[in-house]
Image (cartoon, coloured by chain):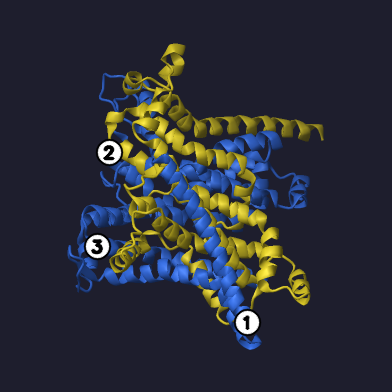
Chain colours: A blue, B yellow
Amino acid sequence: MLVKDSLVAIEAIIVGVVSTMLLFWLGNKIVEVLPNKIRKTLQPWVFIGPVVVLISLFLIYPTLQSIWLSFMEEEIDGSTTWVGLQNYKDIFGDANFRTMLVNNLMWITIVPIIVVSLGVVIAQFANNVGPKREKFFKSAIFMPMAISFVSAATIWRLIYSYIPEGQSQTGLLNAIWVGFGGTPQTWLQLEGFKLNNIFLMIIFIWLNVGFAMVLMSAAIKAVPEDTIEAGRMDGTSPSQLFFRIILPQIWGTALSVFITVLIGSMKIFDIVLAMTGGNYHTNVLAQNFYNEYFIYGNTGKAMATVVVLIALIAPVMTYQVRHYRKMDMLR
Amino acid sequence: MSKFKKFAAKSHLGSTLVLIVISALWLLPTFGLLITSMRESTEAQTTGWWNAIIHFTPDSWTLQAFSRVMSNDGLGSSIISSFAVTLPATILPLLLAAYAAYGFTFLVFKGREFIFSILIGLLVIPLQGALVPVLKLFLKFTAMTGIEISGQYAAAWFVHSAFAMPLAVYILRNYMMSIPVPLIEAARVDGASNFTIFWRLVLPISVPALASFAIFQFLWVWNDYLVAFVFVGNDHPVLTYKLLAMLGQYGEGWQSVAAGSFISMSVPLLVFFSLQRYFIRGLTAGAVK
């Protein structure tokens, strides 16, 4: 089994790479023999053609199809009937769905701002301690970036786990809490003030601060030394130096990190799946898609949920495209 | 001046202390996992991992959980499955994207800006938006040709490749734009075809960007759960899939789940620490996704 699977993998790599190269080579050969004029127009498509086909087939067409399916009801045999806006009426009529929207809103208002702020603060501190220590501390904080959400869930279950009162606590948070005289809590079920949602967000923050730190650190290092020196000459305090001189110059990077984290927290799924499965009012849109489609088999509602998610991300998308256009003009 | 130096030295120490606290906080959860994976089953079930350190007894440490998950739970074959999904899903999009990035950077054609804008827009589209129709597409293909795709590694390669494309082309094009155009022109004057210029000139120059995207994509695919769940599933369970299943069944015990997690983390951590510089460069190049 092991050997067979390894062979399959190796074979796939070889076949894949060789056939891709063959595709390139063949496309090139065909274009080469064509008359000059046709060649000029056709050649670019040899280069971008495979990608255009790939994204059309596996990204654009399916996304449009999802939107189409959100107006349908699907039977078990796969046949579909047009139901208009019924799926949307159903989901928006459901109190649980509105809770989800609130949860998603919480994620995007709380998480990005904390991630970026922590990233900036840590980057600023790391900038002071000399290259050797800087590298060590940064690696430690950046390390969770390499961990899967599922592994992160295992890690954090060891922190949030609950054992009834009177027994030894295996979860770190409860152990500390009990140590200070509290009674053990089922953290992920605490719905007051939506605390359990916040406990899930902490995991995401833990995973992503490193990303913000790395980018903000690069931005801080790019701040011209003489602007800081000038500030020092004028006798500005370190905090003023940061807020008045450094911060305005790293604002652009901070904004793009903010948006990246915003999109990530909008699409949040794996952590919720692995920690609560969306129970205890921690459900979010992407998780609901998963539940509706793979657990309840409700294609229409699942697709409507996805369309709502896409619609919420769309403004960011237009911003990205505009931003890129502006950047491209500057070249 | 000496006053300033004193202040600087003090803030140096202060910053170090703050960073020690933050790093400790950041490492503590993972450290707990590592300790748990080396504990005995009953102890891991009844007491917190810190007890293994506070009441340190060398005899109670064991690597049993690691060998058990590898053999009993079939984590060994899941490692192979993860590689079988990840390696092609890293290499194939890399080649395709590099080829396309060349077209977008050095070739002039109608609709270039338009297509590239669409690509940028697709950067933020959630995976979930395309999953179900792609699944149906594969099933239709199977019904028509009898060739199974869904449940095979190939399904995940296609989907991962397509979803990687926007970011990959974006990063690689950004990089290729820094290659001086006269260099390309000179090669053209010498009679080199675009095909030759790509393989002989642009690809070798772009190695740093290729490396950073490759690491990025490797980590992304290795850590992915959703695509593996939908398209490969139980036939060839990858590590994330296996791990989530283990997480659902507490019978295994904490130490097993912890050991499994640690095994699945070891590969990305190794990649990450050995190639950190490229990874960071990749992040800085394309702060999206």
Q: Earlier in the sequence, mark 2 or mark 3?
A: 2
Report, in whole angstroms, how far the alpha carbon at label 3 lies from the one at label 1.
49 Å
Nearer to us in this view, A7 or A62: A7
* Local SS, label 3: helix
Relative to residue B17, is residue B232 depicted above or below? below
Going from the N terminus, do you reach mark 3 or mark 1 first?
Answer: 1
- Say which element carries label 2: helix
Under mark 2, the amino acid is: Gln
Residue beneath disc 2: A189
Residue mark closest to the camera, 1 vs 2: 1
Q: Is residue B57 visible?
A: no
Q: Mark 3 — residue?
A: A299
The amino acid beneath tag 1 is: Val
Mark 3 chain = A
In terms of depth relative to the viewer, which is nearer, A134 or A180? A134
SS at mark 1 in the image: helix
Q: Position of residue A140 (x, y in %)?
A: 56, 35
Instruction: List x then y, in percent, for residue A47.
Output: 58, 72
**Left or right of A276 on screen, residue A257:** right
Of callouts 1 and 2, which one flags the residue occurring earlier in the amino acid sequence? 1
The N terminus of chain B appears in which quarter of the rendering? top right
Q: Is residue B32 left or right of residue A120?
A: left
Q: Residues within 10 Å of mark 3 (few under 14, many from 20)?
A: many
Label 1, label 2: how many angstroms apart (C-alpha)? Answer: 68 Å
Whole-percent x and y of residue B39? Answer: 40, 21
Residue in the foreground of this view, choosing between B237 and A274: B237
- In this picture, residue A279 sits left or right of residue B244: left
Res A33 label: 1
Mark 1, other Cα within 10 Å: few <14 / some 14–19 / many ≥20:
few
- Residue A43, compared with residue B102, is above or below; it is below
Please check whether the numbered discs 1 and 2 fall on a single chain: yes
